[in-house]
Image: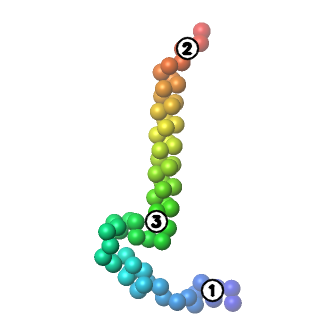
């Protein structure tokens, strides 16, 4: 049927538990499969937001008001 690929899947929970509970030097939020990608996207968007905000504040301070 249509939902068989979603319903009849192997149980991957035990192997993921082993991966997250393994003794590694990485923090928990870095142990996932796509965690580094998501954290990098988050960091880049935060830096872009801060740079844009600082640039806007600088532009408001330095521009002369028009008469």
Residue located 51% across and 31% down the image? 55
Label at residue 35: 3
* Earlier-in-chain disc, 3 versus 2: 3
* Earlier-in-chain disc, 2 versus 1: 1
* Earlier-in-chain disc, 3 versus 1: 1
How dense is the environment of label 1, judged by Cα within 10 Å: few (below 14), some, or many (20 and up)? few
Query: Measured along the vertical axis of the image, is residue 58 above or below residue 24?
Result: above
Dot 2: element: loop
Query: Measured along the vertical axis of the image, is residue 20 above or below residue 41?
Result: below
Residue 9: give x, y in percent of width and height: 56, 88
Residue 30: give x, y in percent of width and height: 40, 66
Question: Disc 3 versus disc 1: distance between alpha carbons?
Answer: 25 Å
Dot 1: element: helix
* Direction from residue 30 to residue 53 in the image, left or right: right
- Residue 66 or residue 29, whichever sits in front: 29
Query: Measured along the vertical axis of the image, is residue 53 above or below residue 24?
Result: above
Q: Which residue is mark 2?
A: 65
Residue 44: give x, y in percent of width and height: 50, 49
Question: Disc 2 versus disc 1: distance between alpha carbons?
Answer: 63 Å
Label at residue 5: 1
**Residue ranking furthest to the top:** 67
Which color scheme is applied? rainbow
How dense is the environment of label 2, judged by Cα within 10 Å: few (below 14), some, or many (20 and up)? few
Residue located 40% across and 70% down the image? 31
Q: Quadrant of the C terminus?
A: top right
**Residue ranking furthest to the right:** 1
Residue located 62% across and 86% down the image? 5
Q: Quadrant of the N terminus?
A: bottom right
């Amino acid at each position: 049927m249509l939902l068989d690929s979603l319903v009849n899947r192997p149980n991957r929970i035990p192997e993921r538990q082993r991966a997250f509970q393994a003794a590694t030097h990485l923090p928990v939020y870095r142990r996932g499969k796509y965690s580094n990608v998501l954290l990098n996207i988050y960091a880049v968007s935060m830096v872009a937001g801060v740079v844009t905000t600082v640039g806007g504040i600088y532009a408001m301070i330095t521009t002369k008001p028009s008469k």
